[in-house]
Amino acid sequence: MSEERYDITVAAGRRVLASTQNLVITPGTVTFLFGESGIGKSLLAKALFGIIDDLDLRVRVNGENYRTYCSRPEVVARKTNGFFMFQEPSSHLNPLQSLEEQLHEGALAQAGDPIGPVRELWDARGGADLERLLPVFPKPYRPSGGEKQRVLAAMAFSKMDVAPERTDEGGEIFVFDEPTGSLDREARDRFLDRLFERFRKRKQTILLITHDYGMIGYVQAHHHALLGQIRFRELVLESGRAKVRDFAPERFMRWLGDQRPQHAEYPKTPLLRVESGIQVFGRTLRFLEGASGKGEVDMSIHPGELVYLKAGSGIGKTTVAKIVIGLLNADHFRMEFEGVRLGDVSPRHYWRKNLWGKKMTMAFQHADESLNPNASVEDTLRLLSLRTLGTAEGVTRALEKVFDPEEVARLRRKKIWQLSGGQKQRLNILRAFTLSTPLIILDEPLNALDFESIDRVLALVRDARRNEQAILLISHNEDIFDAIVPPESVHRLESIATS
């Protein structure tokens, strides 16, 4: 199979937004592209596909003017016969049409049953939910992120089912940009199975952009026969320029095999106990014991314990975290923290005065929620007002926990808005751990990170546990955290309509 090599640059004025000289696509294969968020994976893929239409951007592909590149027959065929699944489904879904109408629109209507691919991505238990969802007009908070991702993936599948056979002009490419970021592992694996079913039949060219290195293990275990037609690659920054390199799947599998559950003896009295049965937004949130949800329990976290709260997207994991830390009111909830009972009638100022940054802290799923875009990297840490950060050497030591030394020198005076998504996330997580509060809440801490950064974040988790800090974890990276968190420290969250 011949390789297609692309040299792509996307710039705004003098500022280069994304650039690489060695993006390689092999027709008739599946390419997984890993890498840190914000270094250009999505922008490079859009340039390759021919869908960048911002007139203020300067784009060149293989030395050609972008308009010339987009007029090439193979690029026209790529857009006509292929599909680009956007990372944020709301960029594609039309709020003025129901989901069912959109599934029957344009080329998708050529499929014998345009709803069929959607059903493939819902399990048998979710059939009724799907029927209620189809008449919905998309809004910011409905459907949920995971539901939107499955609908858009189904659109891509419908297009794959009706795409013409490949020609000498290239035919098609199907780009999936973070297609499972809001899905739990079961839904993610169902997506991968359906994707590879289609690939076996048609051998279409697929580019799948993801932060989920756990996909490697699932592909090796369940689609081993196709490994000769699968490429694993990683986009990394080297001296400020993005470079695509091969990523050896064995590297991740060896690393994952080295991870071990950290069993420990904890004090009898938990640091935090949250009663099951939180009522918020017209729903009741219940904690179930273990990943399989054997029975209803309260959620307890002991000093030095890492507790993993699991649920599908949109169930309410982040809602629980924000209620615990006092950022969100609930209609009904009860918790006990360090022996103090708190609940929905407790004054909000108690959290602000006694707990925030002193007893508990939270690293948000999206770093932009908590970082000042106009502050420098160095000032972001100094604002914590800790003695250990009072000198330049102290700031350097802290930053080197999540950044390479040469990165520290280059980044410390940069403004937050100038950082990549992965750099912001590392700083966001570092700040939470640097406060050294008894309780740390981590909401999707591995989002936006490359493999080396994931390893560094897990080192911070291990150090915090040795210091007897308790950690409440929310994450879709089940492959990684199932290898680390013992079963007795796992809870599943269930949401039911409040009667």
Image (cartoon, grey):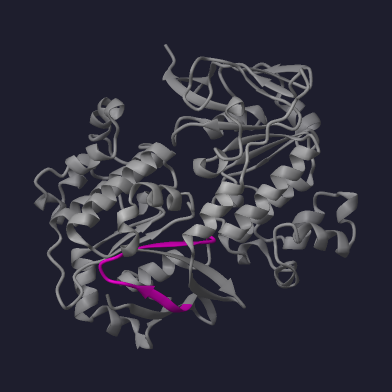
Q: Which residues are magenta?
A: 20-37
Report the label total.
Answer: 0
Give the answer, above or below, for where 323 lies relative to 239.
above
- Residue visible at 16% across and 78% down? 168
Residue 424, horizontal then vertical, whole percent: 63, 57
Secondary structure that dominates the magenta span: strand
Give the answer, above or below, for where 277 lies relative to 396.
above
User: Can residue 371 be seen in this snapshot?
Assistant: no
- Residue visible at 29% across and 32% down? 123
Residue 113, horizontal then vertical, whole percent: 12, 43
Point out the residue furthest to the top here: 499
Quarter of the image with the N terminus is bottom left
Residue 473, horizontal then vertical, whole percent: 61, 36
User: Can residue 440 be seen in this snapshot?
Assistant: yes
* Quarter-of-image position of residue 406: bottom right
> Residue 117 in magenta?
no
Quarter of the image with the C terminus is top left
Point out the residue furthest to the bottom here: 63
Q: Is residue 450 left or right of residue 408?
A: left
> Residue 25 in magenta?
yes
Residue nearest the observer in this picture, 232 or 326 = 232
* Quarter-of-image position of residue 209: bottom left
Q: Is residue 327 left or right of residue 151?
A: right
- Residue visible at 71% across and 60% down? 375
Q: Is residue 406 left or right of residue 232?
A: right
Residue nearest the observer in this picture, 134 or 477 = 477
Residue nearest the observer in this picture, 260 or 294 = 260
Residue 71, horizontal then vertical, whole percent: 23, 80
